[in-house]
Structure formats: structure tokens, C-alpha cells
Image: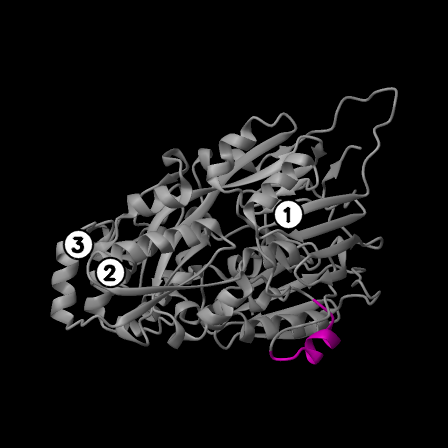
Amino acid sequence: MKFKKINVLVPVVLLSILLVACGKEDTKEKGAANEASPVPQEYKNELNIALTAQPPTLDSAMTVSAVALDTAGYIFEQLYTLNADYEPVPMLAESVDVSEDGLIYTFTLRQGVKFHNGKEMTSEDVVASMNRWVVTSSRAKVLLTNAKFEAADTYKVKLTVESPSSDVLILIASQAQFPAIMPKEIVEAAPAEGITEYIGTGPYKFKEWKQDQYIQLVKYEDYQSVDSEPSGFAGRKDAPTENLIFHFVTDHSTRIAGVKTGKYDIADSIPIENYDELSIEKDLELLSFPGGALTAFLNTSEGLLADVKIRQAILAALNNDEILLASFAKPDLYSLSPGYLNTNQVQWANDAGKEYYNQANPEKAKELLAEAGYNGEEITLLTTKDYAEMYAATLVIQEQLRNIGMNVKVDSYDFPTFLETKNERSKWDLFVASTGYQITPPQLLAVNPDWAGLDNETVKNALKAIRGASTPELAKKEWETLQAYLYELGSSTVIGHYNGIVAVSKSIEGFVNFEAPIAWNAKIAK
């Protein structure tokens, strides 16, 4: 069988992820090293990072939680990962060969890579990890159905897929539910609810998880780094700081106070209302980056909202301007657009479904409710205070729906409980989530049946058409058709697009703000 060597994306995928230059402004490294001086600079042996929520798990295949995936990324690594240009590049693999028919991928592994328990990584570990990911990750289950990884020899792994697709390497390299490589023994012993031994190949190893307080990671002295310049999630990882401590600081005022006083060196998810307050702090730098799309998900499978007319009534009632202003406070830090992906991502950006977007039409909403026979039944909005923008948006939506005569209650939980409750679809009718940008439409939570229960054959067939399209133009056309259908169906709606903000001490060197705060090359002066 013929194979072709690939080290970059196939043309369809490469074109699909080109971003305009303004989308890259904040991926540069922060804090270049100072000029040499007679007195050597001394650095602290720990970085303190304040997270807005406690991760539900560090098992990357089991969660879409950003705080979980960002933290797990220091412990675990992938065969391929994304560089700053959103290209999949080798990490634990050296290279990959793809058969001419696009059905077989043969990965050559790096040799001499050791797990945190001292065991060398071989094909048996990769096969066990990747086959678990295929059946555990909600994205992989849908997009790599019946895919199979097999050991070709000690340092070669073969992946067989059902049909050729342009995004296989993108899925493997993506940070969304990323496929962490871990020892075969850990995989085989993993309970259904997820792994509990966090042993990877990354620059930091797990030391302690003190529930409701912090996770501590310690430098892995035997780490085998790739020998290339840092770029996005790719490249060299030096781990110059001995300890990374991730504090769970769900109270926003406490997180803000802590980063101002220097208790925390990095603080994520800075509420917009604190932007001006922190921007005048001489020892802090605020880094803004394209964060994602604030999105409302409607329950299409159970309860009152299983009726499409009630879902369309809700879409008609929503005034997105009001919701976004309450959630993000500053109009220059959010924008209106019905598109689910980054509006700078020229391959996928479109306004299909705009007639259903930001309607702010309560009279139309009332008419649709009457047609549906709505009679004051209670609906439940699910939310969490751990993410200020999600909670604020939910309260505004509650008021807007009450104004059209709906009986609406709000159930709020801590973030891990929010995620658990979301999976019990009888307990909610609508929830709002801050959804980070994905690279291709098939990776969107809006089309993932495990996320909000949208199990729809039209959606599934459209995703197959997008992935199998022979040209970028055909793929874009298929996505526009699907986006319009999602709005017509009323299964979800983008509320708006927002910028994320991270506060960082000006004493930090080597910190990068890419798709997530990256501190594996960071150090802070004493």
C-alpha cells in the first residue's frame, strides 16, 4: 500500500484554519529576558495561578472544562499538538505516514520518552490511551467512529479510520478533550468515571490535589522535551520553575485582590467589570485574547423545549445586546454575530441563520408561545456563579423570558456540579456556556450530541459532508447550510463573541497567552 509522508496539514484543513493577522496579536511571549547584568537574576521556585473554578477531573478525555484541560496539559502530552499557526505538529510522535486512500495513519513514536513513573513510552501505551480516547471522548466517538489504533512495532502505531477525512490530525492535535498518552496499566485500571492516577510524560508531574483549595504540580526532572522553538502548545518546554500551584478561587473579588497583592502571579477569567481597576496596577499586565462564543443551549430532547415552537419563541425573545452588556460590561470587549466559530476565521465565518439571531421581538415570542399551547409551565435555567459571564447572562435571559409570560426559575451550582447536572437532561431546559473557539465545525459543542442532547440525523449527515468535502469552498457551503439549520431548529444560539482576559505579574518571563495561559516556560523574578 502506498503512503505519503506529511508534516503539515492537507490543503483543505490548512485553508480552513487561516486566521487574519489581528487574531494572532496576543500569542506572543510575554516578558522577554532582561539584558545580562553583573548580578544574576534570582527566580522564585513556585508560580501561583488563580483559577476561576475547580476542575471536575484531570482526565482530559472525560471533560470539556477549560480549567481541567489547561491544567492537565502540564501533566499529559499528545502524539501531535497545535503550534501558534494552528497546524498539527509532532509532540510524542516523530512523524506520521498517511496511506493514499486516507484510511491508514502510521505514527512513528519518539524513543526514550519516559512517563512520570519511570517507564518508557512504547506503542502499547499509545494504543491503550488512544483506543480509550476514541470511545470515551464525546468528540472522538462522533468524529472517529469505529477508528482503531494498533501496535505495528515497539515504536510504531497504526490508526485505521472508516472513511477519509480532512481533519483527523486536527482532532488528534486539538486541546478539546485532548488524547492524553499515559501508561497502559493506568488505562486498563481506569474506572468508568475516569482515571484517578495522573501519570503522563509532561514537564510537570502531579503532586497533590487538595479538594476545593489547589492542585500542585512539580517539575519532572527526567522530562524529554522536543528540540524546537516554543510555538502555541508545541515546541520546547523547559519547566524553569520547580512548582506550579493552581488555586481554585471561585470568588471573583478574592481572585482580583490576590493578583493585585501578588499572592497570585497569574489569574484567569478576569471579570470585565474589574478591567479598569486592574489596568492601572503598575505591577500587572492584562492580556486580552479572542475568548470564544457565549452560547445558549436549549434542551431538544426532554421537557417543554422539546417543542420547536417554544424554542423559537425563546430565540425571538432574546435581546443579545442586553445579555452581552450585563455579561461583559464593555462593548469593545464583545461583538454580535450569529457565527459559531471565530469571526476572524475566514474559512468558516458566515451569518447564516441571522433572521433568528438577536431578534428582541417579545410580541413574536408571545405569538409562538400561544401557538405552542404554553400555559405557564415552569422551565429551568441551569447556571454557575463560578463563571461570572454565564451567571449574568442567565439572569438577563430569565428576565427576558418572564417578560413574554414564561414561568422561569434559575438553578445555580458550583462548576463541577453544573457539568454533572447538565448531563441529566430532565433537570434543565436551557443553559448558557462560554464556549472556547474550535478550529473546525465538527468540533463544536453545538453539534455534539453528548453536550446538550442534540441527536439529529440531519446534523450528523451535514458533519460527514463537511469532513469529506473535496474543496474548502464546498466545506464552507456545507457549514453555512448546517449553521442555518441549527438556528431553524432552535437547538442553540450564539449570544455573542467575547474576549478573555488574563492578569499576569510583570515580573514573569516566558509566559505565553495562546488558546490558554501557558506557563511551562515561565519563571518569576524574586
Tell me the residue at 25%/62% (across/down).
Answer: 485
Residue lying farthest to the top in this orientation: 38
Residue 334 percent coordinates (x, y): 38, 40
Q: CA distance from mark 3 to mark 1?
A: 41 Å
Q: Is residue 4 visible?
A: no
Q: Amino acid at mark 1?
A: Ala
The magenta region covers 182-192
> Circle 1 sits on which residue?
50
Mark 2 element type: helix
Q: Nearer the viewer, residue 134 or 162?
A: 134
* Closest to the observer, 263 or 510: 263
Give the position of the N terminus as an image quadrant: bottom right
- Quadrant of residue 79 within the rendered picture: bottom right
The residue beneath circle 2 is 314
- The amino acid beneath tag 2 is Ile
Q: Earlier in the sequence, mark 2 or mark 1?
A: 1
Asked whether the residues under the numbered discs 2 and 3 touch, taking CB atoms below 8 Å apart as contact, a structural biologist would say no
> Mark 3 — residue?
362
Q: Position of residue 258 (x, y in %)?
A: 65, 41
Residue 303 placement (x, y as % from top left) = 30, 76
